[in-house]
Image (cartoon, rainbow, N blue to C red):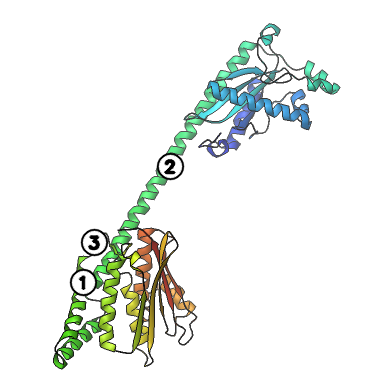
């Protein structure tokens, strides 16, 4: 039986115990609550001496629990109180605890005798095996068990059904209210995430539209184009202008939801690298191993170029030795993993933690990196984002890993 609800999760067992104790005392009847498997979830209340002593015997206790379980199942099927005799002949009833037709458990009550003629008409829930008669000390206790008028006994069962229904309805209403509050909270978080996404996209748009790729980069591009136009006629100049035009076109055509394809993002990066190659000639090497099979994978707009730009700002520009950058993409069947590796002097562990926590460390590219990490998590979930790996030793470089779902456009 696979129920959506579990009794101990749905009802407060301590309050249930108090109710059970008081009901048992006022009605002078034994009572216990069992779960959907017949296992008691409360301590017994008002048990007869015979039943209390029987359950101290492991063998007899098993028959008692089996009777409780069978009674609860019968009440579940009936959807109302069921009166029966347990294996030792006592009259009992089971009152089902139901919510939305899900069986949570049952109130098991009784351990009494009723009028003899009436008693004979009440069926056993399990076979009457008379095992308890093998224990002489139980026979007298069985004989002295209280009698109760059947009419009162049956009325008690229906009273308990109404009490159980009220408890469950109240608990169900409280659960619904909790679920609604949780959904309201979830919706508020989603709205907050939406605001964060829009803010991050606005930051990216502002950077793009105000040409904050880097102001000195734009001036260098224009100066280089001017020099090339003067010195040669004109294929390299044409290629460079074409690459630069593609970059500007990319910045202006991105979708409103901030998503683009990896192929479009890589075309932008390759144009950027081609222009930098003309500017800096042999000061750096650029290797890209991103298979075309990933071209249609959706990725955030302007997610790679800021990281490549950091390579020039913090690796190529500050030194005279030749620099290297390597881009590669792989997948694990679910996500695309992109690695950007350089041969710079790296980043310290403290700076990495500071950058990833949102520290405004412009000297390490922290603003752009944290923006990328936030956009990945806001768009795809907290399990996605950005990782920085660096031994922080000369020429041993830094690797930045990005992960996002392998979803086609």
Q: Vertically, is 300 above or below 246? A: above
Name the image quarter holding residue 104: top right
Q: Is residue 113 left or right of residue 182?
A: right
The tag on residue 179 is 2
The tally of labels here is: 3
User: Residue 171 location in percent, x, y?
Assistant: 49, 34
- Considering every residue shown, the one lying at the far top of the view is 117
Of marks 1 and 2, which one's residue comes earlier in the chain?
A: 2
| Cα separation between marks 1 and 3 | 14 Å
Q: Is residue 57 visible?
A: yes
Q: Nearer the viewer, residue 79 or 337?
A: 337
In the rendered view, would you say 338 is above or below 30? below
Q: Read off the residue under disc 1.
A: 209
Front disc: 1 or 3: 3
320 or 14, nearer to the observer:
320
Instruction: Please report whichever mark, 2 or 3, sits nearer to the chain's N-terminal start.
Output: 2
């Amino acid at each position: 039986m696979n129920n959506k609800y579990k009794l101990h999760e749905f009802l407060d067992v301590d309050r249930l115990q108090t109710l059970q104790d008081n009901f048992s005392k006022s009605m002078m009847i034994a009572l216990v609550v069992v779960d959907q498997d017949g296992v008691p979830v409360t301590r017994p209340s008002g048990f007869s001496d015979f039943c209390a002593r029987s359950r101290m015997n492991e063998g007899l206790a098993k028959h008692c629990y089996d009777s409780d379980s069978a009674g609860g199942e019968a009440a579940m099927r009936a959807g109302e109180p069921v009166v029966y005799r347990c294996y030792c002949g006592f009259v009992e009833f089971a009152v089902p605890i139901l919510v939305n037709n899900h069986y949570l458990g049952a109130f098991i009550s009784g351990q009494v005798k009723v009028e003899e003629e009436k008693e004979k008409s009440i069926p056993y829930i399990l076979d009457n095996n008379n095992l308890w008669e093998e224990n002489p000390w139980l026979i007298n206790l069985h004989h002295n068990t209280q009698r109760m008028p059947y009419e009162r006994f049956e009325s008690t069962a229906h009273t308990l059904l109404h009490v159980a229904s009220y408890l469950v309805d109240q608990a169900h209403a409280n659960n619904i209210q909790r679920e609604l509050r949780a959904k309201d909270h979830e919706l508020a978080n989603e709205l907050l995430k939406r605001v964060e996404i829009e803010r991050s996209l606005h930051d990216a748009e502002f950077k793009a539209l105000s040409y904050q790729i880097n102001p000195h980069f734009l001036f260098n591009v224009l100066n280089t184009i001017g020099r090339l136009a003067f010195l040669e006629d004109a294929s390299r100049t044409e290629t460079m202008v074409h690459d630069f035009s593609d970059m500007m076109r990319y910045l202006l055509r991105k979708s409103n939801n901030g998503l683009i394809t990896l192929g479009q993002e890589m075309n932008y990066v390759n144009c950027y690298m081609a222009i930098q190659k003309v500017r800096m000639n042999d000061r750096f090497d650029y290797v890209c191993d991103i298979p075309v099979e990933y071209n249609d994978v959706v990725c955030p707009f302007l997610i790679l170029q800021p990281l490549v730009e950091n390579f020039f700002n913090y690796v190529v520009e500050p030194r005279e030795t030749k620099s290297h950058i390597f881009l590669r993409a792989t997948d694990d069947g679910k996500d695309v993993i992109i690695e950007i590796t350089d041969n710079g002097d790296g980043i310290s562990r403290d700076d990495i933690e500071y950058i990833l926590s949102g520290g405004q460390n412009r000297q390490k590219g922290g603003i752009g990196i944290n923006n990328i990490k936030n956009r990945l998590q806001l768009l795809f979930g907290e399990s996605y984002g950005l990782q920085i790996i660096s031994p922080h030793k000369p020429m041993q470089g830094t690797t930045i890993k990005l992960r996002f779902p392998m979803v086609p456009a």
